[in-house]
């Protein structure tokens, strides 16, 4: 059995979703690792310890386990983790020596992990595959005022040059790597992410609303981290512009009361006298998310940048139409006028216009929801794992026959 090491310095698959640094990438890591495990790979996911009571080795599936390493303070913000990378590197090497482990391939996730992976791969003489999930140079261009850690772009460029393969989710990200990072065409592979089609499926809306204790208002849903680049502020302004706003509620799933963005959105909501229409629910377990998607009339993804729109795909799998920003990571998932609407401008008027159309037409919502589910069925995690396995095979690392 070929043993693969996933490295995800800041993103533990067990972290509560919707927190400041826990979102789609965490879901991706867990689902991909489990998918590869079912194909016959043994996968160890190395990540930072984020609590004193967690075991160092945490089995996740038959062939998948999570390994927590001590590297800097458990509560260190993501912006400071670059300073913790030498400690993480040392901890990973010590763990391998202690347990007599060797790996056939390293697959790193996010730029912090890429820094570790390029050094380990060189020392161990094994292939290095990387997935950035987001790119600094694309992110800063997506929203005015967006800033990133100073070494990030440089590190991404170095990892792009040194890695044996770079996996991206969309053609747009492939183009960005080539244009902004001088990435070599022959090393970049496009493998879209997926969705758990057994967990995320259409259900009875009334039953879902009863389970969640929701009232009879029409429901707009936002799911994700609370970060300015996610555009939730635009969505709050949008609600205020809806002609039928007294009969519509916005549920915001993600974040917590300590987050600066949570506090900012709460203050905005209150200043606009929308306290009875906008509910900031905080983060929820992933197991509860299908009920929220099933309960919603529309899921809105107003992001300024998405490398891959997992929330949109999960909503679509539940048969819920999506209104999303016309940005590349969402354009590859949402089919405009088929499974929802793509909004070309980040302004409340544009979002309100599309939402009014959907909320006022039951038949259209139902039709778009059916189209959304049909589109999602083609994007399973099994398909993603098989696509990644083909990339590994190019480097001489294959699953058992």
Image: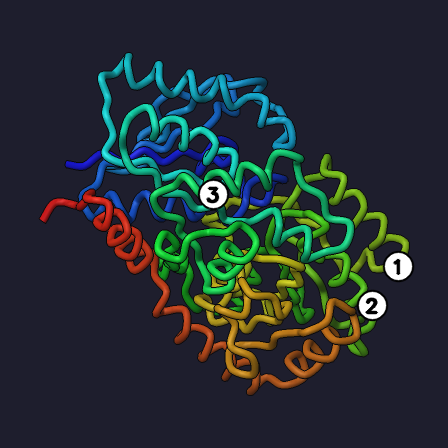
Q: Could you tell which of marks 2 and 1 lies nearer the N-terminus?
A: 2
Number of other residues with Cα within 10 Å of mark 1, as a class: few under 14, some 14 to 19, many 20 or more: few
Q: Secondary structure at mark 1?
A: loop
Q: Disc 3 designates what residue?
A: 26
Q: Are marks 3 and 2 in contact (CB under 8 Å)?
A: no
Q: Residue 313: horizontal and vertical position, in percent?
A: 48, 63
Residue at image point 58% right, 38% down: 154
Number of other residues with Cα within 10 Å of mark 3, as a class: few under 14, some 14 to 19, many 20 or more: many
Near-viewer residue (158 or 273) = 158
Near-viewer residue (105 or 41) = 105
Q: Residue 115: horizontal and vertical position, in percent?
A: 48, 31
Q: Disc 2 designates what residue?
A: 240
Q: Decide: is 52 above or below 221.
A: above
Q: Could you tell which of marks 1 and 3 lies nearer the N-terminus?
A: 3
Alpha carbon separation for disc pair 3 and 2? 33 Å
Q: Secondary structure at mark 2?
A: helix
Image quarter of residue 297: bottom right
Q: Are marks 2 and 1 in contact (CB under 8 Å)?
A: yes
Is 48 positioned to the left or the right of 106 in the image?
Answer: right
Residue that protrudes farthest toward the left in the picture: 401
Q: Quadrant of the N terminus?
A: top left
Q: Decide: is 101 above or below 395.
A: above
Answer whether residue 309 is visible to the viewer in this image.
no
Q: Could you tell which of marks 3 and 2 lies nearer the N-terminus?
A: 3
Q: Disc 1 designates what residue?
A: 272
């Amino acid at each position: 059995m070929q043993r693969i090491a996933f490295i995800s310095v800041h993103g533990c698959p067990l972290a509560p979703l919707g927190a400041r640094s826990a979102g789609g990438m965490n879901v991706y890591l867990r689902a991909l690792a489990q998918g590869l495990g079912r194909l016959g790979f043994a996968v160890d996911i190395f990540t930072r310890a984020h609590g004193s009571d967690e075991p160092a080795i945490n089995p996740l599936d038959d062939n998948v386990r999570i390994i927590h390493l001590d590297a800097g303070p458990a509560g260190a913000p993501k912006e400071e983790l670059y300073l913790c990378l030498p400690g993480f590197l040392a901890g990973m090497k010590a763990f391998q020596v202690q347990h007599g482990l060797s790996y056939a391939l390293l697959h790193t996730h996010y730029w912090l992990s890429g820094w570790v992976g390029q050094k380990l791969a060189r020392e161990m003489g094994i292939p290095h595959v990387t997935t950035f999930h987001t790119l600094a140079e694309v992110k800063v261009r997506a929203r005015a005022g967006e800033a990133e850690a100073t070494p990030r772009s440089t590190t991404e460029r170095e990892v792009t040059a040194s890695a044996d393969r770079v996996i991206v989710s969309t053609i747009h990200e492939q183009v960005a790597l080539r244009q902004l990072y001088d990435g070599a065409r022959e090393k970049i592979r496009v493998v879209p992410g997926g969705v758990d089609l057994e967990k995320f499926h259409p259900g009875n809306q009334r039953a879902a609303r009863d389970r969640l204790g929701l009232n009879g208002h029409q429901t707009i849903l936002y799911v994700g981290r609370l970060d300015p680049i996610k555009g939730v502020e635009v969505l709050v302004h949008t609600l205020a512009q809806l002609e039928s706003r007294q009969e519509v509620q916005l549920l915001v799933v993600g974040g917590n009361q300590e987050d600066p963005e949570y506090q900012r959105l709460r203050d905005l909501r209150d200043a606009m006298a929308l306290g009875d229409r906008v509910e900031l629910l905080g983060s929820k377990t992933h197991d509860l998310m299908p009920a929220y998607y099933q309960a919603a009339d529309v899921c809105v993804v107003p992001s300024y940048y998405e490398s891959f729109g997992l929330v949109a795909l999960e909503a679509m799998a539940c048969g819920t139409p999506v209104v999303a920003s016309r940005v590349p990571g969402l354009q590859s998932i949402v089919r405009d006028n088929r499974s929802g609407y793509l909004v070309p401008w980040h302004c409340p008027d544009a979002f309100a216009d599309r939402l009014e159309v959907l909320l006022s037409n039951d038949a259209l919502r139902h039709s778009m929801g059916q189209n959304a589910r049909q589109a999602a069925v083609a994007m399973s995690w099994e398909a993603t794992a098989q696509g990644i396995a083909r990339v590994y095979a190019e480097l001489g690392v294959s699953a058992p026959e």
